[in-house]
Image (cartoon, rainbow, N blue to C red):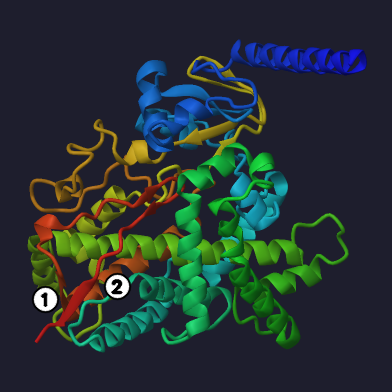
Amino acid sequence: MAQLNTVTIGLVIFATIIIALSYIRILWRRKTLPPGPFPMPFLGNALRLSTEGLMPSLIKMAEDYGPVYTVHFGSRPTVIVIGYQAVKEVLIDLGDIFLGRGTIPVFERFYNNSGLTQLNGEYWRQMRQFSLLTLKDFGMGRKTLEEPIQVEAHHLVDYFRKSNKQPINPSTTLSCASSNIIASVLVGRRYEYTDEKWMKILKDMRDSFEIISSPWGQMYDMFPNIMDYLPGHHRKMFDLLKELKEVVKENVKDHEDSLDPSCPRDYIDCFLIRMRQENVNSKTCFDKTNLVSTVFDMFLGGAETTSVTLHFGILHFIKFPEIQEKLREEIDQVIGRNREPKVEDRSQMPYMNAVIHEIQRISDVLPMGCIRSAIRDVTLRGYKIPKGMDVLPLLTTVLRDPSQFETPDRFNIKHFLDENGKFKKNNGFMPFAAGKRACIGEGLVRMQLFILFATILQKFTLKSVVDPKDLDISPTESGLENIPPSHKVIFIPRE
């Protein structure tokens, strides 16, 4: 018994020392970091963050601590940046310093700490430069990519016509359309909407993002080392994406077997050719692991976020039929009923351009943006941010900043239209982030949204199965991604 008491006392003393050291470490960090709620050892600010949901909690904390403050996700301190002015400082004014990729446990496991999204330093610079140039060679942001988007628009029109005016949920079909456009650049192929295996992969991808954006996913990002061993819904989010990664690996293998270095067909071919050129260099980022992770990441970004924006857009069209009607009037006037929409039409269609921008703003597909880290010590608004510190600019607070948008929480096309009905830019429009680490697919996404929206509205009148006034189009989950609600839509061909 005496021996047991001695062991117990020893464990209590040991635990007390560990807790005391944790507090000392926290107090030392807080001396120079921006202010914030005092964290508990190991738990950080998890209890406070969980009461109202992660995003509302982070935004509300700015009322107490200002637009730049520190919060602890578990034991990991992170500087939160709120609002247009502060986010602009981080992404643009000090953009060359906040170029590092911060800690995202979910993505680190998805990509095995590899690929364009996760790389840092010189490897990231090489990979980004290569990817930008290669994607541009295959039409990214150029008129040459217009044709694959138009082809996909025709397939969408045919699919919606076959619904015979019956209510359908377009979610997975929109994902397939978006994935086909990025697939034409990455792997040189497209998938049919009747391809059950591919459609299941896309549905699994959506389900995975729902879990990531739920409290389960948020808990994983705070306590990854613990959640890896605990049962729960979070374990499914990784399994749901395994099949997509296997498809990417199969495509890479097929490309290796049929590669002709003198005639590259797509992004994978170009990467494989670069791998051969760099084969003598043992310290290169151009290897198969980074190839698989980068293509996997581009599929996720190209198929998921674009399709979510398309889905939110269609929901807004049926929620506001008067806007839909004005869009069709502009389409009939500029394009007509028969000619296929072109990117060059956008400059003559200020109303459509403004509506698409407002859909992107209010949909706020990636409200948290992507976390950054400082590549060297820096001072931000009087606070010392040490090298390696994670910094999270909340893009949702830019897209809904009242200093930039008159009615930030309400759909309002006038945010992008002047008093003469001309399109106007807005500095607060940052759905793709900003600076050197902004989304490389911005040009492609902008082309897709315009051509697909214009084609759908040229050919169909969109209606809801319920009264538009009763239609709730609020996100069902809001975390890493805003998840659109599931509503059925009636596609009525225009005579």
**Residue 115 visible to the viewer:** no
| Percent coordinates x, y for residue 198 in the rendering | 51, 79
Q: Quadrant of the C terminus?
A: bottom left
Contact between labelled residues 2 and 1, with CB atoms less than 8 Å apart? no
Element under disc 2: loop
| Percent coordinates x, y for residue 440 in the rendering | 50, 57
Amino acid type at image mark 2: Asn
Instruction: Please state which of the two labelled residues, at mark 1 or mark 2, is closer to the viewer.
Output: 2
Residue 394: numbered disc: none
Taking 353 as reference, is 187 above or below it?
Answer: below
Q: Earlier in the sequence, mark 1 or mark 2?
A: 2
Residue 332: numbered disc: 1
| Percent coordinates x, y for residue 192 in the rendering | 44, 86
Residue placed under numbered mark 2 in the picture: 169
Instruction: Please tell me which residue is depicted at 43% across the width and 58% down the height of the picture.
Output: 442
**Crowding at label 2, few (<14), some or many (≥20) Cα neighbours within 10 Å?**
few
Q: Quadrant of the N terminus?
A: top right
**Residue 408 visible to the viewer:** yes
Measure how far apart labels 1 and 2 are at the Cα level.
27 Å
Instruction: Please tell me which residue is depicted at 16% across the width and 72% down the height of the picture.
Output: 462
Q: Residue furthest right?
A: 3
Q: In which quarter of the view is residue 311 placed? A: bottom left
Taking 217 as reference, is 87 above or below it?
Answer: above
